[in-house]
Amino acid sequence: MIKQLKYQNITWLSLIAPNKDEVAKLGHEYNIHPLVSEELIHPSLRAKVDVYDDYIYLILHFPVDKVCQPNYSDNLHQDDVYEVDFILGQNFLITAHYENIPPLEEFSKILEASAGLVGGKKDKNIHAGHLFYYIIRQLYQSLESGLDNINISLKRAEQKIFSGQEAEMVKSLSGLNRCLLDFKWALKFHREVLESLAIAAREFYGDKFGYYLSSIIGEYEKISNLVDSNRENFAELRSTNESLLSIKTNNTMKALTALTAIFLPITLIGTIFGMSGTDLNMPIIKTDIGFYVAVAIMVITAVAMTVIAKAKKWI
């Protein structure tokens, strides 16, 4: 599907899941290279920027803006990233993506309403690069809400960790980690691509466009810093959670070891008396009160071992 919007002297063509016929038509109209046309049809695995005589071709991936709560489960983990292809001409901008992207939909509505995007008056100096700047800024800013949700989820996880729910938070932290990995993976190559774009776009649009290019890189850096900050907070929380779990496990093992130390002598005493309980020459057991004496010995031994364990702080 092709959606065409105009703003002043700029034409924006938005392609959603484009087919070969649609791409071929645009390729003929805007003199798009066949290799670029082929890439518009199929998703690409890597981000890149290519410079042609009449346009700049750019591919970027963005993480899907989903709510990552502490109870985030594997079955919700779908469509982790989406791809947006840009073709930047002088007076035209082509974007291609393979699913509906809310930030782009929202921006198209703003553009249709002409809500003061790049000034109310007609400006001959406006080119497609300016429109691209506002689109890419919208895409980056849309990621802030997702990162804020992750930050809130990390704070909730922290409260639960310190309220004694360490074991329950292992899976929750894993889900949050997957969200952060999605952001990290999707934005991994943005810096290199944007730096290459800055060089190419200055030559294509002129040095005056340098401010907008620097601003685009600044928007990326802001998101990248938020991702790194959340990843650092997550690493600290996971380390703390693992330490508390380890302490709980050690305390459990310590208590079990102490119980073993207490009951092992009792078991040994019972085994010794039980081995020869029918022997008439067996001391103590052959008497009428032998059973009670054996039980008393085991009780005394258990009490003595319990006192020793408490004295040594085993329990």
Image (cartoon, helix red, strand yellow):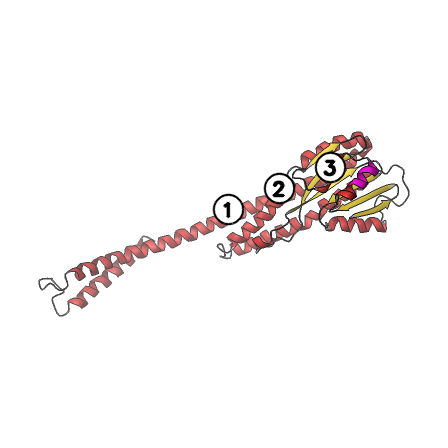
Question: Label 1 is placed on what type of residue?
Answer: Ser
Instruction: Identify the secondary structure beneath mark 1.
Output: helix
* C-alpha span from label 1 to label 2: 22 Å
Spatial CA distance of label 3 from label 1 is: 39 Å
- For image coordinates 54% across by 45% down, the residue present is 235
Q: Nearer the viewer, mark 3 or mark 2?
A: 3
Q: Which mark is residue 239?
A: 1
Percent position of residue 204, x then y:
80, 31
Using the rendered image of the protein, determine whether residue 315 is visible from the camera's viewpoint. no
State yes or no: discs 3 and 1 in contact (Cβ < 8 Å). Answer: no
Amino acid at the residue labelled 3: Leu
Of 178 and 291, the residue lying toward us: 178
Amino acid at pointer 2: Trp
Give the CA separation, mark 3 to mark 2.
18 Å
Query: Residue 273, percent across and down?
Result: 17, 61
Of the two numbered discs 1 and 2 on the same chain, state the one appearing first in sequence. Answer: 2
Residue at x-position 58% and y-position 50%: 176
Residue 219, which numbered label? none
Residue 93: horizontal and vertical position, in percent? 80, 40
SS for dot 2: helix
- Position of the C terminus, as image quadrant, is bottom left
Q: Which residue is mark 3?
A: 58
Q: Which residue is mark 2?
A: 185
Residue extent of the magenta highlight = 24-30
Q: Residues within 10 Å of mark 1 (few under 14, many from 20)?
A: few
Instruction: Assign the magenta stretch its main secondary structure.
Output: helix
* Residue displayed at 74% across by 49% down: 103
Counting residues from the N terminus, which is met first, the one under dot 3 or under dot 1?
A: 3
Left or right: 100 with respect to 114? left
Q: Which quadrant of the structure image shows residue 214? A: top right
